Amino acid sequence: MNTHQTIYLSNYQPPDYEVSHIDLTFQLDEDITTVRSIQKIQRSQTNHAGQCPLILNGIQLQLMSIALDGTPLTEDAYVIDKESLTLHDLPETFTLDITTRIFPKKNTSLEGLFSSGSMLCTQCEAEGFRKITYFLDRPDIMSTYSCHLYAKQSKYPVLLSNGNMCKHGQTENGYHFVSWEDPFKKPSYLFALVAGDLLCIEDSFITCSGRKIQLRLYVEHMNGDKCDHAMKSLKKAMKWDEDVFGREYDLDLYMIVAVNDFNMGAMENKGLNIFNAKSVLAKPETATDNDYFNIERCVAHEYFHNWTGNRITLRNWFQLCLKEGLTVFRDQDFSANMYSESVQRIMDVRKLRTFQFPEDSGPTAHAVRPESYIEMNNFYTTTIYEKGAEIIRMLREVIGHDMFYKGMDAYFNEYDGQAVTIEDFIHVMASVSGIDLEQFKLWYSQAGTPTINVKRTYHPNEKRYTLQLTQACPSTPGQPNKKSMVIPCRLGLLDPLGNELPLTLSKDSTTDLSNQTICLNKTTETLIFENVETNPIPSLFRHFSAPIKLTMDYSDDELIFLMANDTDMFNRWEACQKLMNRTLLSMIKHVQTNQSFSFPGSIIEAFGKILTQTQLDQSFVAEILQLPSEMNIGYAMSDAGETIDPDVIYQVRLDVLQLIARHLQTQFKQIYDSNQENGPYQIDAQSVGRRRLKNCALYYLGQMKTNFDLVYNQCIHATNMTDTIEALSILTHIDCPEREKALQIFFDQWHQDPLVLDKWFAIQAQSRLPNTLQTVKKLMHHPAFSIKNPNRVRALIGSFIMENRKHFHTITGEGYQFLTDQVLTLNQINPLMASRMVVSFNAWKKYNSSRQYLIQTQLKRILQEPDLSKDVYEMVSKALDD
């Protein structure tokens, strides 16, 4: 029976008590850690009569003692249960002294204080602090912290926490201590500590005001040669935030610690960021270009949180997008400035469409600011992060760039040191810009992806061109009817030669056109352009100016024209995606009805022309040559009202890959040969583009047996991990002796490096060869696999269920049963990881009846688990209720 409580946004109440300061003392050990917390508490103004009890959150804690203003309390003075400790009849101000015991080594959830190898560390967001001590564990409780860490020096020579080190010394029996003070008020989710035997890499940064900031990166001793890129990334992020947002770092010390066992990518704890090791460690021999890119972006993201998340935090967890969406927007802009703006936009939109659009159309669809939740961890979603970032980007389009940055300055100045809401943020932007943003706020409260249907008419005699745009948003769980939203559309009109036509709206138009952008705000809007000399080809929603789905009657020839001529590089890529999806869906339909179909030669010709355009960014060429993934083709089928057919999708996509490879083999070989490495590995945009295009060519060449030796030779002789992994990823699909030999050579060389070994597991899980599921099951018994390590779970199990659509969706149902087995196992070990695995079942109603039955059976099997965590329960129950 469901006993899990649902939390509602509408029920938010300010806290009855406030904690001005908390002093923490830890006697650290992996088996038993003793925590003493001394909290200075006062009633809030809403509880001036003291009628409300003090309810402190606490989970899996062993209470040793509790004292009120120095007087020990007996058991009849408080009520304790599995999730809280309650006290009544308290004075207006008082000090609470609580001692608890916790057990880090047994804490496999990786929330609170836990053991990672020989290290101890914390993860307190969202609600992990309650696993450390009894406390008002909510983001609107902002307190100053002091922290005293005691531990055996030989085992834990490094002791870290937030803020500034103020004292350290030796104690008896080989123990030592370090005391830390954080001068800035913060919520409990930003508390952090780390204890371990770690190497410290040091550097410094001079701020725009001339202050010297000490930068420290802590890693295991063996990883000292993998820190240079992360440190450079941090310094670039600090400089960029000063230049673009005017934000200077506030403490004198900034620390990053790399941890092997971590549920997240990283955590922005004030002054002490704790990172998943994969988001820090890199050198050419062990990390790919993508690893380097992700490290730079992740380091920047967590640093940017210092102002958008830490200095200004959240009133409650329903406002999560206010820190995450805003900070993702900032890190996306940072990455675009560092490399290619158009390629960065393509990568961001691909992620949005692959993960967030399906989320918006499935059983777990929720607004960017949700109305309710059972387990807060389940709302760390692409809707909060990526769609939240798109809303900020749209806001910048709506009010203009200059007003946006003025608004950000006003936001920082007005709300520094406070816990705020989305309304506060929008209010500042509206006040600064003078624009009414009430309708715009619907983006935060309405779930679902809007669709824009476009009709066009050209009147040659009047030289008038008309675009009629109609918006609609589909129903989502709990939201059957939607209101029209503000949707910015950046657009252009191209003549037959690819030239931009001037945009002149008719005098009767009520729509404002500013910087080639209009803001739709009605269900249907008609744009009439005058003095249009020729029938144009429209380029709409340039740079993906809004997270919408566009329906328009482009012909194949028009899409090919846009691929070659659009001045907006994103829309050139977009035209290719539309053309390929349309063609692939048509082929799939013909296969399903046993009809013949010829792949259009015009597309192959267009691809061939792109390969000859040497003036294009090589990373962009590699992007445009990528076919839509099997997953995205499936979503396109669903959007077209068709049942997703994984088997046919796989075969048709493979046929097209091989067809393009055969026709353009000469060009691909020329591209491959002319982009070989010359000199040492570099991570600049030009070098990355050259490798991306070369390996894109190799991917196509690898579809033909005559090129297997070429792929194998790159895999064995490559001088950097990017080229090695790209070749090994191609080989994993090929049934040949070289495949097994390459995998063994790779393992023998890198089995001591956990992050590189993750790649070895992931590549095998993605193989399209028969018996891959059996291979995955066998690898789960490999000595190097641990289901307690999130990175290893994501690499093997996650890669199989997310990247191997062919074998996960086998009609026998074995893939579904396998996933359920792992969810039930992880439910007992790490519920957060378990709930994230369940997401792969969300689209179950979009498959045929046989697969629907098989998935539904497994969902019901999970729901019957007697000790089902609230994390997993929430996801499964929503999937079944769809």
Image (cartoon, helix red, strand yellow):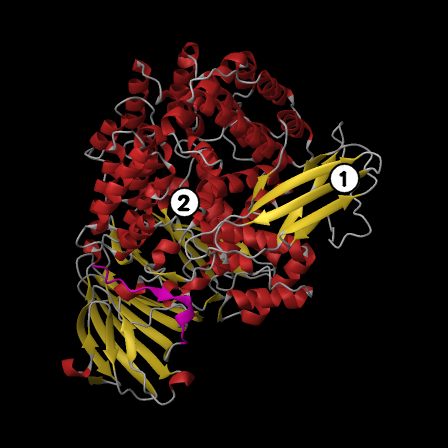
Element marked by disc 2: helix
Picture coordinates of residue 489 (x, y %)?
Answer: 65, 47
Q: What is the number of the mark on residue 210? A: none
For the N terminus, which image quadrant? bottom left
Q: Residue visible at 59% across and 52% down?
A: 393
Q: Residue furthest left?
A: 75
Residue 630, quarter of the rendered image: top left
Picture coordinates of residue 180 (x, y %)?
Answer: 36, 67
Residue type pointed to by label 1: Tyr
Dot 1 surroundings within 10 Å: few (below 14), some, or many (20 or more)?
Answer: many
Picture coordinates of residue 775 (x, y %)?
Answer: 24, 27
Picture coordinates of residue 218 (x, y %)?
Answer: 37, 51
* Residue matched to label 2: 279
Lateral position of residue 433 relative to residue 354, left or right: right
Dot 2 surroundings within 10 Å: few (below 14), some, or many (20 or more)?
Answer: many
Residue type pointed to by label 2: Ser
Residue 745, quarter of the rendered image: top left
In terms of sequence position, does the residue under pointer 1 or pointer 2 come before the other?
2
Q: Which residues are magenta?
A: 1-14
> Compared with residue 238, is residue 69 higher up or lower down, i.e. above or below?
below
* Residue matched to label 1: 465
Give the spatial CA distance, label 1 vs label 2. Answer: 50 Å
Lateral position of residue 300 relative to residue 756, left or right: right
Residue 79, quarter of the rendered image: bottom left
Q: Residue visible at 37% across and 29% down?
A: 646
Which one is in front in this view, the residue at disc 1 or the one at disc 2? 1
